Image (cartoon, helix red, strand yellow):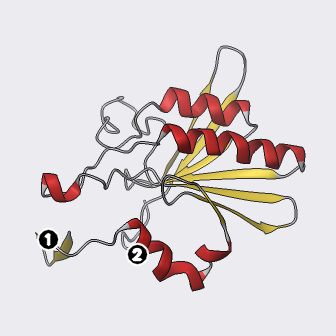
Amino acid sequence: MALHGRRPEPTETVAPDDFRRIYADAGYGDTVTAPEDLSYRVDPLPGLTLLMIDSARYNRNEELGRPETAGAVAIETLEWMERELEYARRDGRAVLVFFHHALLDHSTTGRYASTRYRVDDAARIGRVLVDGGAHVVMTGHVHVHNNTVLFTDRGEWIHELSAPPVSIYPHR
């Protein structure tokens, strides 16, 4: 969808293979990619790994006639994440993980970040991250500037930072 004034209008979509081709020369071609979607790993600095996780559910957009707002991570991508986190841990690298969709609730009432705005199976994804040593997650789908921390009963934690898009100004 494209927004023209206040009116959304359908627009052509970019298929995953087209995305890979379009952005290959913009850095995407130099990354380690997941086999099932557009997730990728990049090591921009010595000692730092960024995992960029494709949480969009775009496979049914044409069938539905609209984009799905909830997120999901394929089982194959979770398995890929586990391997990439092990790679980073073996190499002594710090890991930052980025999702479009939130894992945690960023509201004080527990109602704002409903399942429409969060990734499905967040508990399982969180377990993969914690077990892999990734404790910082950055997200954006809820369009709020917020941070929240989840502590497990074993004393583990995930700190999730949610940032609005740059098109929303001022950031409050």
Q: Residue at x 33, y 72 (%)?
A: 14
Give the left or right position of residue 153, taking residue 85 as reference: left
Q: Is residue 8 above or below residue 90?
A: below
Q: Is residue 45 above or below residue 58?
A: below
Instruction: From the viewer's side, name the closer residue of 48 and 83.
Output: 83
Q: Are marks 1 and 2 in contact (CB under 8 Å)?
A: no
Q: Residues within 10 Å of mark 2 (few under 14, many from 20)?
A: few
- Residue 39 seen in this snapshot: yes
Q: Residue at x 41, y 40 (%)?
A: 119
**Which corner quadrant holds the N terminus?**
bottom left
User: Looking at the picture, how far across and down is residue 57, in whole percent?
Assistant: 34, 50
In the picture, the disc for residue 18 is: 2
Give the left or right position of residue 19, taking residue 134 as reference: left
Secondary element at tag 2: helix
In the picture, the disc for residue 100 is: none
- Residue 166 seen in this snapshot: no
Query: What is the residue that sits farthest to the top in this orientation?
Result: 153
Q: Is residue 95 above or below residue 32?
A: above
**Which corner quadrant holds the C terminus?**
bottom left
Q: Residues within 10 Å of mark 1 (few under 14, many from 20)?
A: few
Q: Amino acid at mark 2?
A: Asp
Secondary element at tag 1: loop
Give the left or right position of residue 167, taking residue 39 as reference: left
Q: CA distance from mark 1 to mark 2?
A: 18 Å
Instruction: From the viewer's side, name the closer residue of 67 and 38.
Output: 38
User: Looking at the picture, how far across and down is residue 59, in whole percent?
Assistant: 30, 53
In the picture, the disc for residue 10 is: 1
User: Looking at the picture, how far across and down is residue 120, in whole percent?
Assistant: 40, 35
